[in-house]
Amino acid sequence: MRAEPPEAGMAWRNWAGNQRTDPLRTVVANSTADVVDAVKAAAVDGLRVKAIGSGHSFTAIGVPDGIALQVPSDERLVRVHGELVTVPAGMTLRRLNTLLWERGLALPNLGDIDAQTVAGAISTGTHGTGATFRGIAAQVRGLEMVLADGSVVMCSPAENAELFSAARVGLGALGVVVGVTLQTVPAFRLHAVERAVPLDGVLADLDEHVASNEHFEFYWFPHTAVAATKSNNRTEAAGPERGRVAEWVGDELVGNGAFEVVCRVGKLAPRLVPRLNGLVAGQFAASEYVHRSYEVFTSPRRVRFVEMEYAVPREAIREAFDGMRAAAERHARAVTFPVEVRFAAADDIPLSTASGRDSAYIAVHVYRGQPHEAYFGAVESALAGLGGRPHWGKLHTRTSADLRASYPEFDAFVSLRDRVDPERRFTNAYLERVLG
């Protein structure tokens, strides 16, 4: 398989539409050799290279300003070795999940969106929820990468260990990931319980909710007293099943179709937002069913938005929620999107948002086209002051000057980047801001 001929002037935009650019060239690579050729050609021409995935980052982390490189995604490259699975970096999580299930396997934890590529998900720190579960990058057992000099390296805990450790959440700054080996688990089903309950009760019993469920999260709609809770636990049971009508109502009508209408109405008539949010909150979570793990973890997301998410130390979640709630009361009068609260176990990845500490995540969203700066800024101020770390793929204003203090291994990561990419072949404006 050879790379498709480079195309000039292919406009690029992310899923949310808030990041756009016109790269000089677009290269679709079908093999590692194609990626090597693209990187070497970029060096000759003095251009920067950015591997592009599905465009599901809200920040400019994936914005290409020189060569936009689509990495291999062909499912024929998948290799299974027991519970270790090697996949092409450009494959989407959606396709990976179905391929794993066909082989009796699954990933132990997932986020709620499955449109990202495998490389994009791990490189930005996609995490999911579950107090004893870590993010997807923590399941990585090996990486195949193309470095700035065109060399191809394999890295794992036993081979190029320093590069492996950092590149699991590498922000695309260390090289082009072309293959990923993941640790999987036997396929499993989840018992999902989704309920709308009083917010004060959830906050009062939060530790119990988190400890008694394998995967727990809740949504809070600004200006309401209701929380939509989601509890997912492994089960051997076959039911209750979620019928097709119920699935369509929950995912398509309430989760996307009707919610899109609510967002549009709220945008046109902000005074109605508190009433609309109260109405939606009661309908957003009202089901119980058993399904394949990946079908429960993930949901379709067709109502477009922009998002900011912060990870705070697990013990700071109540103070963080109070700070976010105060910011929402001041600045989110017209916001119809809920706040999402999730949890994750500590990991050992240098630039993971859960590096070295059990974490709680607070994510705020705004419907596309609506102003978000004041709301996000106020939330960021409250959460950064609690030691918060911003999700690399979600909007924030932090720079290397203050991020350095948030990550004990920040300088070591930057030093490694300087060694493997001295000419900044893989950087862009966002990486210059957050890494220096």
Image (cartoon, rainbow, N blue to C red):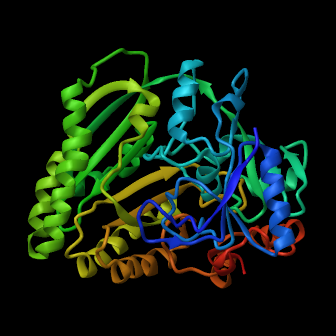
Observer-nearest residue: 324 or 120?
120
Quadrant placement of the N terminus? top right
Number of marks? 0
Residue 187 in sight in this render: yes
Residue at image coords 23%, 26%: 244
| Vertical arrangement, residue 306 with respect to residue 158, above or below | below
Is 147 on the left or on the right of 381, as rendered?
A: right
Observer-nearest residue: 43 or 407?
43
| Vertical arrangement, residue 259 with respect to residue 171, above or below | above
| Vertical arrangement, residue 158 with respect to residue 365, above or below | above
Residue at image coords 43%, 78%: 382
The spot of residue 189 in percent (x, y) is 44, 23
Observer-nearest residue: 413 or 267?
267
Observer-nearest residue: 24 or 225?
24
Is 434 on the left or on the right of 155, as rendered?
A: left
Which quadrant of the figure has residue 249? Answer: top left
The spot of residue 266 in percent (x, y) is 15, 68
Residue at image coords 65%, 36%: 74
Is 28 on the left or on the right of 218, as rendered?
A: right
| Vertical arrangement, residue 274 with respect to residue 166, above or below | below
Is 428 on the left or on the right of 151, as rendered?
A: left
The spot of residue 16 in percent (x, y) is 41, 63
The spot of residue 395 in percent (x, y) is 48, 71
Which quadrant of the figure has residue 38? Answer: bottom right
Residue at image coords 53%, 49%: 116
Quadrant placement of the C terminus? bottom right
